[in-house]
Image (cartoon, helix red, strand yellow):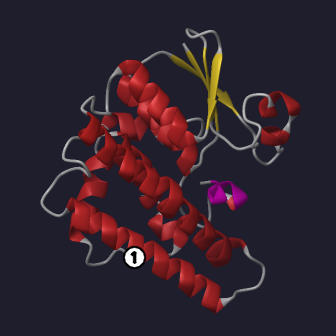
């Protein structure tokens, strides 16, 4: 049994989508970001960085794992799924996972801050992060040209990048002309496990009237 401490953010979705894909037993423990539960002592004992998600593997001596990418690697290795066993193939998947962790997530997080939440609109900052997000999306689009998934076979790299790229409208980033990326987004959106994972612990609609993700989207 996996205990999953999470909230409705792209990083949280990465783990719940993966858990749904793997079909292993897990229990959701919602973390209220608005009440700063992620900074409470009980949560810091699981993740000293005070960010969601975190997991505890009850079948492995209550082993705790934090950082969404590290959790994905742990679960993929634990189950032997969605991460190839051959070293070069595994490295390719990990490279694209790190691409999301170091690029897509942080840049979209900053775009969210300056485009949505910063009290003063700073056009230069908004343009900088929109341009960088678009550049990263173009990299993904190039990789996806002629293939269904980032590394040919569906993997944790697809899940990680999709959970962020799917909120491009909320971040104010245009994906017009990125045909391969758009087809890939639709391909993952149609997967039942993806559909289930993004409504845990709560459904989150991406429009101004119903959502206020705030600083939670800054987490990479």
Counting every numbered tag in the picture gives 1
* Rendered image quadrant of residue 82: top left
* Residue 202: % across, % down: 59, 40
Q: Quadrant of the N terminus?
A: top right
Q: Which residues are magenta?
A: 215-219
Residue at numbered disc 1:
135
Is 193 inside the magenta-drawn segment? no
Q: Depth check: 46 or 127 in front?
A: 46
Q: Quadrant of the C terminus?
A: bottom right
Vertically, is 166 above or below 142? above
Mark 1 crowdedness (10 Å alpha carbons): few <14, some 14-19, many ≥20: few
Dominant SS in magenta: helix
* Rendered image quadrant of residue 210: bottom right
* Residue 2: % across, % down: 56, 18
Residue at 59% of width from left, 49% of height from top? 9
* Residue 52: % across, % down: 66, 41
Residue at 37% of width from left, 24% of height from top? 22
Residue 31: tell me if it is visible: yes
Vertically, is 57 above or below 197? above
Looking at the image, the residue that sits furthest to the left is 146
The answer to whether residue 64 is left or right of residue 203 is: right
Residue at 79% of width from left, 28% of height from top? 45
Residue at 31% of width from left, 64% of height from top? 140
* Residue 113: % across, % down: 67, 70
Residue 16: tell me if it is visible: no
Q: Depth check: 218 or 190 in front?
A: 218
């Amino acid at each position: 049994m996996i205990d999953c401490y999470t909230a409705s953010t792209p990083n949280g979705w990465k783990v719940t989508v993966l858990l749904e894909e793997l079909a292993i037993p897990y229990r959701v423990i919602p973390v209220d970001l608005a009440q700063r539960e992620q900074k409470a002592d009980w949560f810091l004992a699981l993740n000293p960085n005070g960010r969601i998600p975190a997991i505890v593997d009850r079948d492995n001596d209550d082993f705790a794992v934090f950082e969404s990418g590290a959790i994905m690697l742990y679960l993929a290795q634990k189950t032997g799924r969605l991460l190839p066993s051959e070293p070069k193939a595994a490295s390719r998947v990990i490279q694209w996972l790190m691409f999301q962790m170091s690029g897509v997530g942080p840049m979209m997080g900053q775009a969210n801050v300056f485009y949505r939440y910063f009290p003063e609109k700073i056009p230069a900052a908004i343009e900088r992060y929109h341009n960088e997000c678009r550049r990263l999306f173009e990299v993904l689009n190039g990789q996806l040209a002629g293939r269904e998934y980032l590394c040919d076979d569906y993997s944790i790299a697809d899940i990680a990048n999709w959970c962020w790229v799917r909120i491009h409208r909320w971040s104010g980033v245009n994906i017009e002309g990125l045909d391969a990326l758009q087809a890939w987004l639709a391909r993952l959106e149609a997967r039942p496990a993806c559909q289930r994972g993004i409504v845990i612990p709560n459904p989150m609609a991406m429009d101004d009237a119903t959502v206020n993700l705030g600083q939670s989207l800054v987490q990479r």
